[in-house]
Amino acid sequence: MLTGKRVLLIISGGIAAYKSLELIRRLRERGAAVRCVLTRAGAQFVTPLSLAALSGDKVYGELFDLTDEAEMGHIQLSRDADLLVVAPASADLLAKMAQGRADDLASTALLATDKAVLVAPAMNVRMWEHAATQANLAALKARGVLTVGPNEGDMACGEYGFGRMAEPQEILAAIEAALGLPGRLSGLRALVTSGPTHEPIDPVRYIANRSSGKQGHAIAAALARHGAETTLVSGPSQLPDPPGLRTVRVETAQEMLAACRAALPVEVAVCAAAVADWRAAHAAQHKLKKDNGAPAALELAQNPDILSELSQAGGQRPSLVIGFAAETERVVEQGRAKLARKGCDWILANDVAPGTATFGGESNRIHLITADGVDDWPQMTKTEVAERLCRQIAATLGR
Ligand code: C5P
């Protein structure tokens, strides 16, 4: 909870500003007082009236509004808060912060503050990747400014990449962490598997699948944000190691199982990895040459089933073992069967049929299957799925 905490929310220009309305609601639900500063560019995207209605407070805009200065100067505005949150943080405002400029109320409050500052950048991918923006961000981080996001995905401008503002729930968790509040899952130990596995045929060839690791990494990151002591066991993935947790990188299913066993005991295990069911029975030490005559058939051996192993780990069985069922047809029916077969507690069944873009995509549609029945979740981003799963885990474990 954030009861009694005061957040100064600075909203700069960007289409992501609409998500800040949701952030205000979530902050107030959790007991925080929110006061908003809206930049001139921000006001092109959300209105002061919406912010005032949701925050229940006056909205501040111009620096040289004498009435405001009489009521509350910019120094007091920033000193009065426990935390300053900039969401969305535009490339322009980040640049101003990095340079220490103070030509409007937002930048002045940021320069005048002696409180922690959290920024949620949101901008076009090229602007985000530009060396100027990255240098500004590095300078801010070096001064102790905290960051959340941006996430990768489709952008309002039609491009794709990093630059989407973090989701309100992610920003909320980052605010709790910035305020030093114990997360809902603090003290809990969690293990997540993610990504594909690579099963070598010879030193240059391997058996693999199309898993990107996005869902598993998002779950590990969300667990960590909520305070869980998290180990992420990741197969080969392009994704960076998420912050605030321990990542163990592996290649094969057998290595993944060994890393999972080494991470025990944990209270919660989420198996999101797309583990190869089969491996080459005899991986060649040297590259197979076609002029030596290609092998007539590739002999396969079955890989260990990590989800089943964790579900049957005897005295070391986690209290909650959660698996995924990626299916292309009869999704719920097959998910139910998998729950029984694997001996886990929950299955998150999702449709990966061609056209759903679940594999490698940004969103997911989950059916949560438990002994009590099936809960159909709406289509959500993978980050939102991760957040909802964390809430469900917290509620189930009585946190
Ligand atoms: O059997 P299937 O691969 O459809 O089951 C999917 C679930 O089982 C996922 O949670 C996946 O992470 C897990 N699994 C595993 N080890 C395997 C195969 C699947 O942990 N060898």
Image: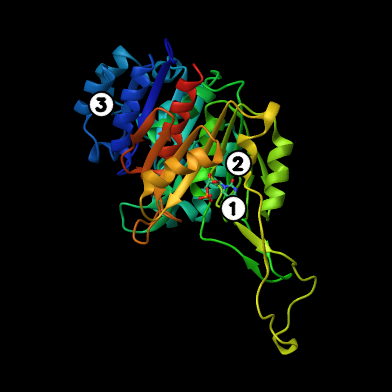
What residue sits 47% from the left and 22% below the top? 396
Instruction: Return the mark for residue 275.
Output: 1
Q: Position of residue 211 (x, y in %)?
A: 52, 56
The response on whether ligand 1 sits within 8 Å of label 3 is no
Q: Position of residue 320 (x, y in %)?
A: 55, 29
Camera-nearest label, 2 or 3: 2
Assign a secondary structure to mark 1: loop
Report if residue 272 is visible in the image. Answer: yes
Q: Is residue 389 above or below residue 253?
A: above
- First along the sequence among labels 1 and 3: 3
Q: Is residue 47 left or right of residue 336?
A: left
Q: Quadrant of the N terminus?
A: top left
What residue sits 39% from the left and 57% below the top? 160
Assign a secondary structure to mark 2: helix
The response on whether ligand 1 sits within 8 Å of label 2 is yes
**Amino acid on which disc 3 is placed:** Leu
Q: Nearer the viewer, residue 386 or 92?
A: 386
What residue sits 70% from the left and 71% below the top? 204
Camera-nearest label, 1 or 3: 1
Q: Which residue is mark 3?
A: 51
Q: Nearer the viewer, residue 112 or 222?
A: 222
The response on whether ligand 1 sits within 8 Å of label 1 is yes
C-alpha gap between disc 1 and disc 2? 12 Å
Instruction: Return the mark for residue 308.
Output: 2
Q: Is residue 211 left or right of residue 15?
A: right
**Amino acid on which disc 1 is placed:** Val
Q: Is residue 231 above or below residue 392?
A: below
Q: Position of residue 234 (x, y in %)?
A: 62, 48
